[in-house]
Image: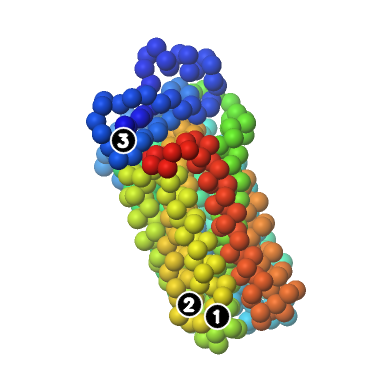
């Protein structure tokens, strides 16, 4: 099969810049004539043609790997803490606030993610115009203050403000920087580098879940939050000097690239991300309490399911990162979304046994890890590197909507339909979310190319 690629030449650059402003362009042309198994489609974004270097450090070098390490640590603490909220949810629901409904308690973690997402829109634009190292450090301080302040809270409302709103605001800075910077620093092995950086969130979720459970059991919830706040603040501050972008948009670029929302591919991508993110947190939040209420396991056993799921998400992030450079990031995103839907529909919906729950944990953990790691790679590959922070910022609008469509309706179904003991309706709702995401991703994929063996 012939290999196709997009190539920018001197005589086409001017016409691209003049004809289409700030929009990814597909240009297919024959390559050097060698045979490959896959057709390759590359993209040229006009913002990348006009991008300016923000540093003299080269791509793919030793410094680039230091940036990856800094992103790994920043995401390990910022997103890892959010992924570990299921332990707090279990503690609040079963021990500290048993009179509060599941839906009300779940809003603490939901507000945390919603503010992180909507704050990510602003953070994405700030990262293009201000020093990301300073922004990352500011975020670290706010994260620490939020959890230390939360340790003194004694009501669900107070925790929504500190553990939810304030922490989400602080974490939005390392969240955006950590997900958008890695792709800028690599021209080769871009998927692998991004996968390694984003695996930090899975590693953080894995050990933070176990550590949070152990800290609550041994020291109590207030001191667990103080330790978490201090550790996260110090660690993220320590790596902030390496959290820097390599490319910045030309000074003439718009602050908000509104042409993206006119691009059908980007609209389909945003719609797919709404349902993907809505599906992401459901198992993490509900599996610990499901283990106790339905399977009659201990609270520590339930939190171990979150730990196991986070562990598999790390494997998924790394595996998909390596494969994305071979088969194409969008192809891998489609495959992993299908796998997530398969795991929930086939193993969790019809069964309520320990063995099938462990299977769901393994399959969904691997799939969701691959999904979140390849999202910025797809964005960079299709829509351009130079404006990736603001592109990710726009995508966080879909994250925000996904956060609203995810855990709150699941928890409301558990309270209203399942009476806090029957999880069937909640699991069905959870399982249909990746199905909806898959439909939009397939539409995006076949909008780009209807050929199956195409590297996209």
Q: CA distance from mark 2 to mark 3?
A: 42 Å
Front one among 219 and 351: 351
Residue pictured at 44% horizontal, 73% vertical:
359
Which dot, 2 or 3, sits closer to the camera?
Answer: 3
* Sequence-first disc among 2 and 3: 3
Front one among 375 and 235: 375
The local secondary structure at tag 1 comes to loop
Residue 307's place in the image compared with 122, above or below, is below
Q: Which residue is mark 1?
A: 352
> What color scheme is it?
rainbow
The local secondary structure at tag 3 comes to loop
Q: Is residue 22 left or right of residue 199?
A: right
The tag on residue 1 is 3
The tag on residue 157 is none
Q: Which residue is mark 2?
A: 356
Q: Is residue 235 left or right of residue 159?
A: left
Q: Residue furthest right?
A: 416
| Mark 3 and mark 1 residues within 8 Å of each other at the beta carbon | no
| Mark 2 and mark 3 residues within 8 Å of each other at the beta carbon | no
Q: Quadrant of the C terminus?
A: top left
| Mark 1 and mark 2 residues within 8 Å of each other at the beta carbon | yes
Q: CA distance from mark 1 to mark 2?
A: 7 Å
Q: Is residue 415 left or right of residue 387?
A: right
Whether residue 25 appears in this view of the structure is yes
Residue pictured at 64% horizontal, 75% vertical:
424
Whether residue 165 appears in this view of the structure is no
**Residue 72 in picture, x, y percent from top left:** 39, 53
Front one among 159 and 441: 441
Residue pictured at 52% horizontal, 22% vertical:
251
């Amino acid at each position: 099969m012939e290999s196709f690629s997009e190539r920018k030449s001197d005589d086409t650059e001017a016409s691209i810049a003049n004809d289409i402003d700030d929009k990814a362009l597909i240009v297919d042309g024959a390559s050097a004539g060698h045979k490959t198994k896959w057709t390759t489609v590359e993209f040229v974004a006009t913002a990348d043609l006009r991008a300016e270097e923000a540093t003299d450090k080269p791509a793919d070098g030793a410094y680039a790997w230091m940036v990856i390490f800094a992103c790994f640590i920043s995401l390990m603490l910022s997103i890892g803490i959010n992924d570990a909220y299921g332990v707090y949810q279990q503690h609040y629901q079963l021990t500290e606030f048993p009179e509060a409904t599941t839906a009300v308690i779940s809003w603490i973690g939901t507000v945390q993610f919603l503010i992180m997402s909507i704050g990510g829109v602003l953070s994405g634009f700030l990262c293009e115009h201000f020093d990301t190292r300073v922004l990352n450090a500011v975020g670290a301080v706010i994260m620490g203050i939020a959890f230390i302040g939360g340790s003194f809270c004694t009501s669900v409302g107070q925790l929504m403000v500190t553990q939810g709103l304030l922490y989400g605001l602080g974490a939005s800075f390392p969240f955006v920087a950590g997900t958008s910077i890695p792709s800028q620093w690599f021209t080769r092995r871009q998927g692998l580098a991004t996968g390694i950086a984003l695996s930090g969130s899975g590693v953080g979720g894995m050990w933070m879940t176990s550590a949070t459970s152990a800290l609550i059991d041994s020291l109590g919830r207030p001191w667990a939050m103080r330790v978490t706040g201090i550790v996260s603040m110090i660690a993220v501050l320590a790596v902030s000097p390496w959290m820097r972008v390599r490319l910045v948009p030309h000074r003439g670029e718009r602050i908000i690239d509104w042409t993206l929302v006119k691009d059908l591919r980007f609209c389909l991508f945003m719609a797919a991300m709404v349902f993907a993110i809505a599906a992401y947190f459901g198992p993490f939040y509900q599996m610990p309490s499901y283990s106790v209420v339905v399977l009659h396991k201990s609270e520590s056993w339930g939190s171990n399911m979150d730990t196991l799921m986070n562990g598999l998400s790390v494997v998924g992030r790394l595996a998909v990162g390596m494969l994305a450079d071979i088969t194409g990031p969008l192809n891998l995103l489609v495959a992993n979304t299908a796998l997530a839907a398969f795991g929930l529909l086939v193993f969790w919906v019809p069964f309520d046994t320990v063995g099938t729950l462990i299977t769901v944990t393994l399959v969904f953990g691997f799939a969701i890890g691959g999904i979140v790691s390849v999202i910025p790679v797809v964005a960079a590959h299709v829509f351009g590197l130079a404006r990736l922070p603001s592109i990710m910022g726009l995508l966080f609008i879909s994250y925000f909507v996904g956060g609203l469509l995810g855990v709150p309706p699941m928890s409301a179904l558990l309270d209203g339909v399942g009476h806090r003991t029957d999880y069937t309706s909640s699991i069905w709702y959870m399982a249909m979310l990746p199905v909806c995401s898959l439909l939009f991703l397939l539409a995006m994929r076949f909008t780009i190319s209807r050929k199956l063996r195409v590297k996209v």
